[in-house]
Amino acid sequence: MHIPDSFIPLDQAVVYWAITIPFIFMSMKWAKNELDEMKIPILAALAAGVFAIQAMNIPIGMGTSGHMVGATLVAIVFASPWAGVLVLTLVLLVQGFAFGDGGITTMGANILNMGVVSGFVGYYTYAALRKSVGTSIAAFGGAWLGLFISAIVCSVQMWLAGTFPLVPGLIAMGTYHLIIGFIGEGLITAVVITSIAKFRPDLLEDSFNAGSDRYNTEVHA
Amino acid sequence: MSGKSNMKFLYAGIAIALLLSVLAPFLASPNPDGLESAAGGVIEESKMSELEEMEPAVSSPMPDYSIEGMGKGGEVAAIAIGTFAVLAISFVFGKVFNKKA
């Protein structure tokens, strides 16, 4: 879903940057409040894993492929969608500048779609479902919906840019990403989160995010 | 939670990322992704070739995760270099924003 430079005119690309920069700023604020010696290795491991798995395109039929985005996974582990925004920002910076995967002018839109939209939708869907359906299914559902909604947002951007017609764009992007979201995002996120819940349950428990709880208490007090 | 087990998590993450770097050039589907495929289906051909001819705003040193003239080995190296770059940036970023610093 990496939008190349040519797909969005410069004036619109600047607007997406302007929308996205406050989110990047907030994710840095999150990092400043939350990251410590204990959490940095976890963040680095997830960022490296997200970068590498994005190179692994999975065939989905119809002559099309897709890969995981990973914002929901990161957000679930850190119990915050800002963590997803942060990791996707770092990954998209490296992809854009070193590998030409996603444009530089369109990086704002790409961070918005893959970091902000997919991370926020994915994480809050997971949080809403977790108590009723359990961690694994909630992780699957959140990741799937997060990717699908970000693809819908992307097709609306493509329409505003004059690159895609609205309805055919929505149908094509929606269809492909329903499938990519099921396999590439939902299943992988569920498997990884289920493994973490088994081998490192402390990462998903409140103890790991005790710092954030304290922080919230202080803020609310 | 201990710092030691978090370092284990890090090593496991690096191992998985490097395994993916080695496998992706051979196993990843060469088919266009969802956005490219949608573009191919909904954009008129003349406009599509126009879009494809446009150069990216900034040229990258390893376009399409490859190193010129190095074939599959170059692709493995490119993804591995990217993995280490993301790791390094994450650690530098973590140090800068470390709340205890």
Image: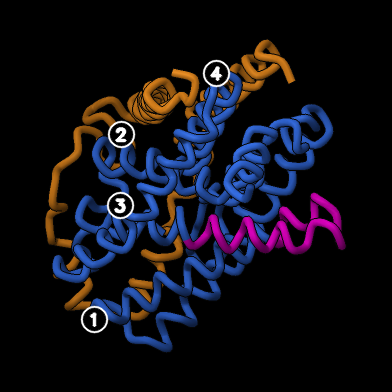
Chain colours: A blue, B orange
Q: Measured from the top left, where is residue A67 in percent x and y? A: 52, 51
Residue B47 horizontal side relative to residue A175, left or right: left
A119 in the magenta segment: yes
* Amino acid type, label 4: Glu
Say which residue label 1 marks: A162
**Spatial CA span between label 4 and label 2:** 34 Å
- Residue A6 position by quadrant: bottom left
Q: Secondary structure at mark 4?
A: loop
- Mark 2 and mark 1 residues within 8 Å of each other at the beta carbon: no
Q: Nearer the viewer, mark 3 or mark 2?
A: 3
Say which residue label 4 marks: A37
- Give the chain of mark 4: A
Which residue is painted at 44% across and 56% down in the image? B31
* Amino acid type, label 3: Gly
Q: Which residues are magenta?
A: A117-141
Say which residue label 3 marks: A102
Q: Relative to A170, does residue A201 appear above or below in the rendering?
A: above
Q: Measured from the top left, where is residue A23 in percent x and y? A: 39, 54
Q: Relative to A124, does residue A88 appear above or below in the rendering?
A: above
